[in-house]
Amino acid sequence: MTHIHKMNTEISSRINRSLVLSLIHENPLISRAQLSVLTGLDRSTITHILKYLLDEKIVRETEKGKASSRGGRRPISLEVQYDGRFLLAIEAGTENCDAVMVNLRGDEIRRWRRKIRRGEPLLDILRDIIHKIETTARKEFKNSIVIGISSPGIIDVEKGVVRFCDYHQWRDVDVVTPIGKKYRKFVFIENDANAAAVGELSQHAESNNRGLLYLLIRESPPESEQILGVGGAIIFNGSLWHGTNFFAGEVSDTLNSLFLTGMIKKWRDKMSRTHEMKKRTLGYLLESAANNNPDSRAAADEIASHLGKFMGEVVAFLDPGCVMIYINPSHDGYDMAARIEEYFYKHIPAGFGTTRFLAPRLKERAIIKGLISLTQEKIFVRDGIHSSLLFK
């Protein structure tokens, strides 16, 4: 019983520290008295928590404002010491692996890039770029807390495993265990579309959006049977939906089964017959559609129609409130995103007409931005259940 009581006390202590730290993060230059009011904790408990945070150089004191009319010291406020710890975000994409180091506030400290050879082993890529970070930013890397990683494909978020990435043919790659063990950091991995959705939604906070259906659309390699790589993300009440099996985030197979019929199949077969396999890509399709090639235009419209109908049916089922599509490559002469939106509103039930299409603002930068936000969520925690990784 004593052991259980001690364990509960330790857990409670970490949760209270996390609550106080998050409030200081959200309310820069807050006072001890204000913390006591906001948390409901007595002054002595606040003092005890702050002693720990100050001793660990996680929080610092600063004198701000004016002294009272009676004289004496100026009031002492509290702020997070953001530059004492660091976070890493690593995007393992299709062509490049990008890494960004930020402080606890999310300010960028340094950036790295490494080219990826298609099909190169994922762990080799990650170890190589982390080694570059470790050797070129040794002090900051030593003081980094979290490594957040993103990848295309089906990601088992709970176990930290890339189940399948069609583009690179990665299968059942355990990322979190070996990387965490080697570098002694907390590591997590997320589907790239999920990370991008978090990043994009953070840029639309002014409209208080809490729900989003997001599609990240990229082209498949010319030799692939699929024409598109499609990642999908759903955010409910500000939180990512990972699904029962923690696999949510990849919808390529579902959609491409629709794309291998009709005008799309006719167009791809024609490209193959004319020995132009390298042109069987989304980029070339949009370019030729912009040039008013009838076959390409019909195939592009058919893709837009399928995607618009698919999104309309998902919205009718889930009612997220907002929808966003990011397509890369794109073409100014044929706005596929606008065509998808047009078909979406044709297919959506009348009662969902208020669903808003949001324009992507970060585009390619959304994945790294989302990863940074997700790493910060591991530090600034105030849900009353979990505690910050700073206190593990």
Image (spheres, rainbow, N blue to C red):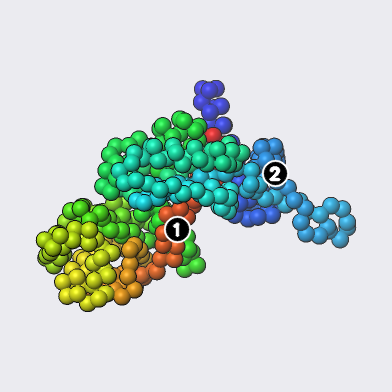
Q: Disc 2, disc 1: CB below 8 Å?
A: no
Q: Which mark is residue 245?
A: none
Where residue 136 appears, as percent x and y from the top left, is 56, 41
Which residue is denoted by mark 1 in the rendering?
Answer: 365
Residue at the spot 37% in from the left edge and 46% down from the top edge: 116
* Residue 335 appears left or right of 176: left
- Foreground pick, 335 / 42: 335
Where residue 368 appears, as percent x and y from the top left, is 45, 53
- Foreground pick, 25 / 182: 182
Residue 29 figure quarter: bottom right
Q: Secondary structure at mark 1?
A: helix
Q: Amino acid at mark 2?
A: Arg
Q: Secondary structure at mark 2?
A: helix
Image quarter where the C terminus lies is top right
* Residue 323 appears left or right of 221: right
Residue at the spot 70% in from the left edge and 46% down from the top edge: 60
* Residue 95 appears left or right of 280: right
Which residue is denoted by mark 2 in the rendering?
Answer: 43
Residue at the spot 84% in from the left edge and 52% down from the top edge: 73
Where residue 125 appears, as percent x and y from the top left, is 40, 41
Mark 2 / mark 1, whichever is N-terminal: 2
* Residue 190 appears left or right of 345: right
Q: Amino acid at mark 1?
A: Arg
Above/below status of 271 relative to 165: below
Query: Number of labelled discs?
Result: 2
